[in-house]
Amino acid sequence: MRDIALHIDTYAEPTPLAAVEQAVGFAKMLDATLTGIAINIDINAPENWLAERLLHVSELARIEERKSLDAAKASLTHLQSLAEKAGIRHEAKLVRASLHGVGPCMAKLARTFDLSLIVVGARVDSQRSVAEDVIFGSGRPVLAFNPQKSLLPSGRLTRVAVAWDGSRSAARAVADALPVLKRVEDVRVMTAVGEKASATAGQAGDLVRHLRTHGISAVPDEIDGRHRSIGASFAAYLEEVSPELLVMGAYGSSRIKEFVLGGATEHILNNCSTPVLLSH
């Protein structure tokens, strides 16, 4: 992965500076070019003469748009400074999109990058919807992380876990992650046996064989997924194994152009204790 994008949120809460710092360290580890993409929001204030006279909505919109622009410029300047100190290739991109069009805008831009880094937090965080749009709309992988609870790795990767159930999405995630997996000392292939019909005992062996042909030595890990939710299974496994990165397929079903997330994807995005590379 030589071409990485970092989505920089500018409204309502700007992306934390710690996230930018971690993105620089991650890009340095992979010897990649890091492009910061800051999206300046466009608030289309409704045309209403009474609201304009009483509340001055146009002026309020301009103030908020200016806050977004200032946050974008500050974040891009910070990225440039850190990238120069780290000696990595870097670019800055400032684009404009409507308040509710940030996700689709980022998804379109992400199509010409190897990987997009996106900060995620609470379920209602605006970044959560951006992550979903990019995961399901870009055709490229997303690395979701929380700079306080699930720090991006830097320096070198010691252990990475791959969630494997034999599905198309899981296969896509593994293929997307191959450049990263080749750098890892300890790769674990985790299957929650019995959680779904496709997740069966011994299934990880096929993936272990495939990874071996790429020079990647992997170990299969099977856990009992029959008596607890998939979210609880993931949480227990990640706590026990402590990988620096999780690779998994993103599951979702389309409902009137909106994606209803699968249980594993929903849990990971809501409880991001480990950075996770997601592909759909």
Image: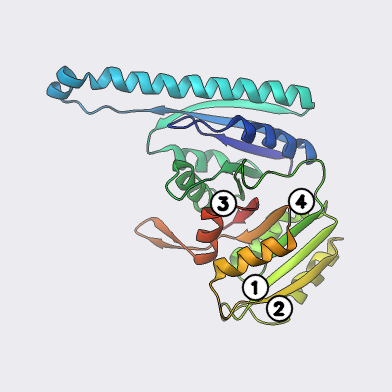
Residue beneath disc 3? 139
Residue 175: quadrant of the picture: bottom right
- Horizontal relation, residue 247 to residue 98: left or right: right
Secondary-structure class at tag 1: loop
Secondary-structure class at tag 3: loop
In the rendered image of this protein, does residue 243 appear above or below residue 72?
below
Residue beneath disc 2? 203
In the rendered image of this protein, does residue 85 appear above or below residue 115?
above
CB atoms of marks 3 and 1 within 8 Å: no
- Mark 4, Cα crowd under 10 Å, few <14 / some 14-19 / many 20+, is some
Label 4, label 2: how many angstroms apart (C-alpha)? 22 Å
CB atoms of marks 2 and 1 within 8 Å: yes
Considering the image in quadrants, where does the C terminus appear?
bottom right
Of tags 3 and 1, the one toward the viewer is 1
Residue beneath disc 4? 180
Of the two numbered discs 4 and 1 on the same chain, state the one appearing first in sequence: 1
- Mark 3, Cα crowd under 10 Å, few <14 / some 14-19 / many 20+, is some
Residue type at mark 3: give it.
Gly
Give the image location of residue 138, x and y in percent.
Answer: 54, 48
Label 4, label 1: how many angstroms apart (C-alpha)? 20 Å
* Residue pictured at 67% horizontal, 69% vertical: 164
Residue type at mark 1: give it.
Gly
Secondary-structure class at tag 4: helix
Label 3, label 2: how many angstroms apart (C-alpha)? 26 Å
- Mark 1, Cα crowd under 10 Å, few <14 / some 14-19 / many 20+, is some
Of the two numbered discs 4 and 2 on the same chain, state the one appearing first in sequence: 4
Residue beneath disc 1? 166
* Residue pictured at 55% horizontal, 66% vertical: 231
